[in-house]
Amino acid sequence: MWYISTRGTAPRVDFEGALCSGYAPDGGLYIPEELPQLDRETLGRWSSLSYPSLVKELCSLFIGPELIPREDLNGLIDRAFSRFRSRDVVHLQKLKHGLSVLELWHGVTYAFKDLSLSCTAQFLQYFLEKRGKHVTIVVGTSGDTGSAAIESVQGAKNVDIIVLLPKGRCSKIQELQMTTVLKENVHVFAVEGNSDELDEPIKAMFADAAFVQEHNLMSLNSINWSRVLVQMAHHFFAYFQCSPSLDTHPLSPVEVVVPSGAGGNLAAGYLAQKMGLPIRLVAAVNHNDIIHRTIKHGDFSLSQAVQPTLASAMDIQVPYNMERIFWLLSGSNSQVTRALMEQFERTQGVHLPKELHSKLSEAVTSVSVSDEAITRAMGRCWDENQYLLCPHSAVAVSYHYQQMDGLQPRKKKQRPRCGHTQKTARKDATCNLTRSLRHWHLDLRHPTSGTRREYISIF
């Protein structure tokens, strides 16, 4: 399996090359040169697999045995999930009115990014030990990526990690998860500005190929292909758990609602769709709605400023994984993708060509959710199910309630719908919960915040 840049002028690389990098040298993102197509027999065989087994099957399609033999690959994935609190790793919770919630938060930091980062870190360690190399990882975070990335590599002898976080824009618990890890290989910096602004110098740094090579730099943000690869398993698992039957022809679709920031999980879902998984994707965003505007109107442009919301880890204006989606929708046309992205980078906005926008709106629908709708969804979900959502998950569930309330009474039956949950409340709840959940008491203290020192440098 070879990987090429979405912008078409960088040399192709194998999985190791895509993993141990940031942006491609031409500024694009790595993506498989060809996508495997899954037939009904394969989907049927996969339908009974556990989540870890699904990850193994998917990864074996994209990581050749000459790089990681299958037995070694299985062992790395088992090791990655060994610290998860749930033996199943991922759990599907079925709620009322056709809503299913895919719980992706059973990892160490309670963020869904524990899933992809734990595997990616194991793949990275495998190659570093094999080659006798050291790398420096550079990560920009809006909250959850930083803590999950730190957790995945803290204490590793052949890795240093530098995390840039936006000062005052992460939740306190997220910040503590980063600043109280006092390992010699962990370096955390608070930066003035928002997460998109701190991404700009990171991208400029990765554009300097000589500097990147000299210092062995790489990224664990979702520009890294390995992150997207593992996240594809979320969508396959959701489909198999929610689909009423695999005996129908054609296969019945399942609607998958994805809380979206930088778009890595959304890109993973679209890749799964392209491989033959019959899912209908909904991108659910907060007030920072560039993905929604792009899907609805073809308007891929920045707003005046990032707006702080209750779903703070999704407070993002530059969803860089849309580049992968544009490339796929354009029929692997690197010239079109490069022109779009270079204009966006120059002018901070571009209107999609009519044909590309039409394909995008057919492949993905979207919704933008206000803070008020987030708190209403949290309260309603608790009242109806005694099930507690975090604000990020509530962005997706709010879409479900909008659809439910818009149906006529005689038409309440609908296709199965699955929303991805990003975190638990103990990771990222807010004072608005007291209004939504009047009699519910939450202990939101970080488990070690009173006993561990913080260390952070401020730019």
Image (cartoon, grey):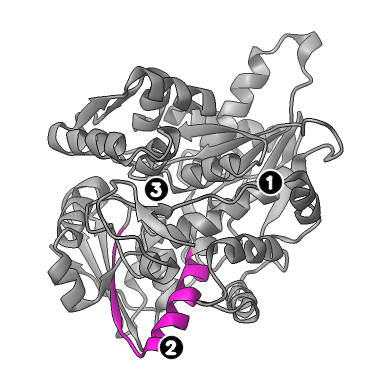
Q: Nearer the viewer, mark 3 or mark 2?
A: 2
- Residue 336 position, x and y percent, is 29, 34
User: For this rendering, which residue is in front, 199 or 2?
Assistant: 2
Q: State the residue lying farthest toward the right.
A: 247
The numbered dot on residue 238 is: 1
Q: Nearer the viewer, residue 175 or 70?
A: 70
**Callout 2 secondary element:** helix
Query: Does residue 156 show up?
Result: no
Q: Amino acid at mark 1?
A: Ala
Q: Tell me which numbered mark, 2 or 1, is placed earlier along the sequence.
A: 2
Magenta: main secondary structure: helix
Choose between 47 and 337: the one closer to the eye: 337
* Magenta-span inclusion, residue 388: no
- Mark linked to residue 130: 2
User: Residue 391: x, y in percent?
Assistant: 50, 41
Looking at the image, is mark 2 or mark 1 nearer the viewer?
Answer: 2
Residue 294 image-quadrant placement? top left
Q: Check residue 130 for magenta coloring.
A: yes
Q: Residue at x 36, y 55 (%)?
A: 4
Q: Position of residue 335 (x, y in %)?
A: 27, 38
**Residue at numbered disc 3:** 313
Q: CA distance from mark 3 to mark 1?
A: 22 Å
Q: Tell me whether circle 3 and circle 1 mark residues in contact (CB < 8 Å).
A: no
Q: Quadrant of the C terminus?
A: bottom left
Query: Which residue: 68% across, 60% down?
Result: 54
Secondary structure category for the residue under label 1: helix
Give the distance between the C-alpha atoms of the residues marked 2 and 1, in whole angstroms. Answer: 35 Å
**Residue 106, percent from left and from top:** 61, 62
